[in-house]
Image (cartoon, coloured by chain):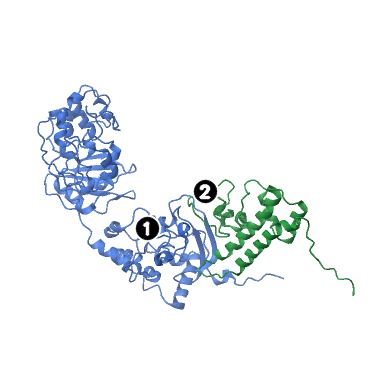
Chain colours: A green, B blue
Amino acid sequence: MPKVKTNRVKYPEGWELIEPTLRELQAKMREAENDPHDGKRKCETLWPIFKIAHQKSRYIFDLYYRRQEISKELYEFCLDQGYADRNLIAKWKKPGYERLCCLRCMQPRDHNFATTCVCRVPKHLREEKVIECVHCGCRGCVSGD
Amino acid sequence: MAHRLLRDHEADGWERSDFPIICESCLGDNPYVRMTKADYDKECKICTRPFTVFRWRPGRDARYKKTELCQTCSKLKNVCQVCLLDLEYGLPVQVRDTALSINSNDTIPKSDVNREYFAEEHDRRARAGLDYESSYGKVRPNDTILKLQRTTPYYKRNRAHICSFYVRGECTRGAECPYRHEMPETGELSQQNIKDRYYGVNDPVALKLLNKAGEMPSLEAPEDESIKTLYVGGLDKRVTEQDLRDNFYAHGEIESIKMVLDKACAFVTYTTREGAEKAAEELSNKLVIKGLRLKLMWGKPQAPRPESETSEGARQQAAVAHSGMLPRAVISQQQNQFQPSGPGVQDQAPPMQYFNIPPPPQLDRAFYPSMDPQRMGALVPSHDGENKSGSEKHQGMPPAPGQYPHQHYPPYGYMQPMPPYQLYPPYHSAMPPPQMSSQHYQHSGPLRPPPLVSAPLTSAPPASTSSGSAPAVPGPSAASESSHQ
């Protein structure tokens, strides 16, 4: 039999420092996935998923870009393994999108009249002050406020 | 492989349109409207055929509205696709049909295949350009419908629906809940059915409206027989004197028409009392000029004013003169007779002949604030900085305060004259119709006669507490006026 190559994950150095938080976040995500839908609106059931995904990506993004506590290798490793969303982080690097909640909210193709979600509108330009966007339950992800 | 459409739309004859047939209220107050168009999105609520659904938001505080009926159905009854009210009058189908005696109910089948067939036939003929009989264009509007029609758009219809969770006490959305947190209105009117409303059968709103139409109060003539003047309120700059003349000449010979644009009102005086009465009767609830519904009422009667010693000048300027019909310019001219300085006082061209006429009979009360210069902000020695009158006629006043003996004011409970604009709201917004028989605008000038029977809301607050007719005083008036006792 030819040698079967298995893909075994080789964790880079520094992994032990971030592993507990990441595991915790993953557990939270599993919990959100298994939550019953009672008492929630149909769109509302998905909000925790988006929230936790944002949290995970945020953690890794902060560690690498803001606090610079992990190496590039470890950062890339996390992205490859799916602990963070590469595309979302790509947006966070752009001005104006530093706090973007999710990728759907800024995609004009997903909205009527080619606009963005209401959570991308600054509070002083909005009429309703308290909103929860329908995609991810975001209350406002504008960089300004 | 070639794509095959699931349905061949053309063959089925489903309806497509470019723009909805909707009324002004449903379209909203915003001139910028973004509307989505979805072909064959929903079925018509009446004929259940697929049609093009338009969806838009009629204004900032409105919910999203979408067309509920197809255009064929709405054209058959000449109603708005969304609210099912008549396009011209804004009335329910039943009201319009009874008022105009149209009866098309027999021709439109109501059930099942019959209905669909009829609708499709109609649609086909309309698209082919055949002129089907549309009786709505040919009907002449009659009195009743003019009385009942809606002249301004009604945007309250576009508010969000009531939050049903809130009604049960369970709304967890809190501040971000887009639905209204109010208790729903209960009662007969809330059981409405779209089919009933469309066919004009058994519609509670229509029944209520028809009942109301039967009992609409007519303008009673005032007891004082000498009054030949009608007050017309709710004017706008679009309405000209010629419009008023056109409307009023039919009932009698018009002696004069005076427009007081500042107050958005006008006074039409007839030469005969009968003419005035006839006009009142004919036009009482139906006066609509250029789309603006105007309020018609009798002019204020004269009543003796219990003034003690007042100098002629002060009396005159306090007095309104001539059944209260003199333009302000004339009054100011009379004032100027006693005051040498009166620069540029006229804001209207005064009829010169009034100067030679002996002073008009004194009235104890000025009917409208514009008639009393002190109300307009004329300076009185004790009131400094009261030059806030917008009317330039009073600029002549301040330099010569001596003309107005101070002692006039206390007996009449004179209050600080308010800036004219604050006075206006009481006069125009609070108008309880049923009481408007004779004296409407109570005027709280320096003359405080025993309280008249008058619309309480419209009085600027009188200082004398004995005057019982000053409830519901509007805020600004109450706040800024004080008695000078």
Q: Is residue B106 left or right of residue B277?
A: right
Q: Nearer the viewer, residue B173 or B444?
A: B173
Locate residue A64, reporting x and y percent: 71, 50
- SS type, badge 1: loop
Q: Is residue A145 left or right of residue B104?
A: right
Task: Name the residue beneath numbered marker 1.
Answer: B88
Locate residue B406, reporting x and y percent: 17, 28
Q: Mark 1, residues whose alpha carbon is within 10 Å: few (<14), some, or many (≥20)? A: some
Q: Quadrant of residue B330?
A: top left
Q: Is residue B166 left or right of residue B465?
A: right
Real-space Cα distance between discs 2 and 1? 41 Å
Identified by mark 2, the residue type is Lys
Quadrant occupied by the N terminus of chain B: bottom right
Q: Quadrant of residue B102?
A: bottom left
| Vertical order, B32 against B317 (above or below) | below
Q: Mark 2, residues whose alpha carbon is within 10 Å: few (<14), some, or many (≥20)? A: some
Task: Name the residue beneath numbered marker 2.
Answer: A123
| Vertical order, A7 against B338 (above or below) | below
Identified by mark 1, the residue type is Glu
Let me know if residue B261 appears in the view: no
Locate residue B247, reporting x and y percent: 26, 48
Q: Residue at x 40, y 60 (%)?
A: B181
Locate residue A123, reporting x and y percent: 52, 48
Q: Label 2 is found on which chain of the structure?
A: A
Q: Nearer the viewer, residue A136 or B3?
A: A136
